[in-house]
Amino acid sequence: MRDFAELAHLDTEVLRSLLEAGEAPERVRAAWALALRLGGTIRPDLVQGALTEPEPGVRRHLVVVLAGYQERAVLATLASQDFDAAVRAVACQYLAMIGRPEDAGSWRVLHERLEADASGEVRWAAIAYLPPHTPAFLRSAVAARVGDESLEVRRAVADKLLEWAGLSGDGLPEVVVSRLQLEPDLELRREWVRGACALGGDRELLAALVDAPEGTLRFVLELYAAQRVRLPWECLRPFTQHGRPGLDSLLIGLLEPGPQDEADAWLLEVALRYWRDSTEDYDRESAWAARDALECLEARLEAGHLREPDAWVCTLARKLWEALEEARRRALEDHVTGCEALEHDECFAEEWPLDRTLETLLDLASRGDPRPGDD
């Protein structure tokens, strides 16, 4: 079996004979050698060979060669009629790659393959290589395949729709929200969310999830947290009304810095829900949400975002301080009962780390007290 370097030096007629009657690898190498040597004059022979060649592997190579000659009609025929799925796939690939805006026939073939081909490989190729100038009717057909039985096809749909959205600047594709609820593959759902964030559509996506199931919302918020997304209070407010501790913790982590009395009041309410009823058997998520709320409040205080809190924030701060003081008293009683030490300040401080928080809350509450000289 002669390699390409050897074949390339053979006489043109010998190469022609190998193209017609050589073994399959020789026919492939002869096709490439003749194309490089003769250019367009060998095109009719290659076209005929692509349509009559018995070996699918050879036909796939001929598709690539013919794409270089812009032979859209032959590629369209192979994409539609070849019995081998791999040949149809590569024909669709190159038909999309060389397609011009005015090539209506090429777009119709790709649309037909996308709609009717039983091979996931072909449907994938009919999507994955589509250019930015793909006509609207074919774009709609791509969007319609978001529920394709093939994961690879669905992944190609996601990639292509997000790519087009990024190029056009039209914002988030409408199918994103539905796919977050219906897509069975976890990683592909993550890709939809990451793609939305990359497009700057994190706020738009979240707004569309107001009525989504909690599982879907939690999934998105967790991905936002992993990507360190930060959002203004206005975006988060609709999701803070349900009092779900697991979601509250995620929302707290997404809150962007900045003065906002309503957000501060909500943080105090999250912590107060837990500490006001801390004698009950509260779940771990409630405790975490209370902890996260207090940490966020302290960070906001240190950043100077609560210099002039409104009356309701000050009232909530005092209520929370009272609840924590009562919890501290009970915790200290329990500690003294079970501790053999004569002095308990140091050992109790290891069990109760919130004394600094108490001071912070008392300071915050006092900012609402009347000041000397105030009426």
Image (cartoon, helix red, strand yellow):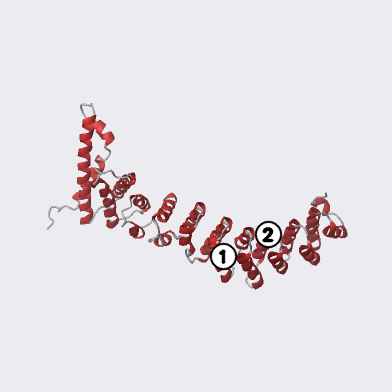
| Residue 279's disc number | none
- Label 1: element kind: helix
Q: Is residue 311 above or below residue 344?
A: below
- x, y percentage for residue 8? 82, 54
Which residue is pictured at 25% across the width and 33% down the height?
Answer: 348
Label 2 CA crowd tier, 10 Å (few <14, some 14–19, many 20+): some
Per the image, the residue denoted by label 2 is 85
Give the Cα separation between the discs numbered 2 and 1: 19 Å
Closest to the observer, 234 or 59: 59
Amino acid tagged 1: Val
- x, y percentage for residue 354? 26, 40
- x, y percentage for residue 319? 20, 49
- x, y percentage for residue 165? 51, 64
Which residue is pictured at 80% across the width and 67% down the height?
Answer: 44
- Looking at the image, residue 374 sits to the left or right of residue 289; the answer is left
Q: Is residue 312 visible?
A: yes
Closest to the observer, 256 or 287: 287
Nearer-N-terminus badge (2/1): 2
Q: Is residue 196 visible?
A: no
Which residue is pictured at 62% across the width and 66% down the height?
Answer: 116
- Label 2: element kind: helix
Closest to the observer, 181 or 137: 181
Find residue 242 and report its image quarter.
Answer: bottom left
Find residue 72 and report its image quarter.
Answer: bottom right
Q: Is residue 346 above or below residue 145?
A: above
Label 1 CA crowd tier, 10 Å (few <14, some 14–19, many 20+): many
Amino acid tagged 2: Ala
- Looking at the image, residue 149 sits to the left or right of residue 281; the answer is right
Per the image, the residue denoted by label 1 is 142
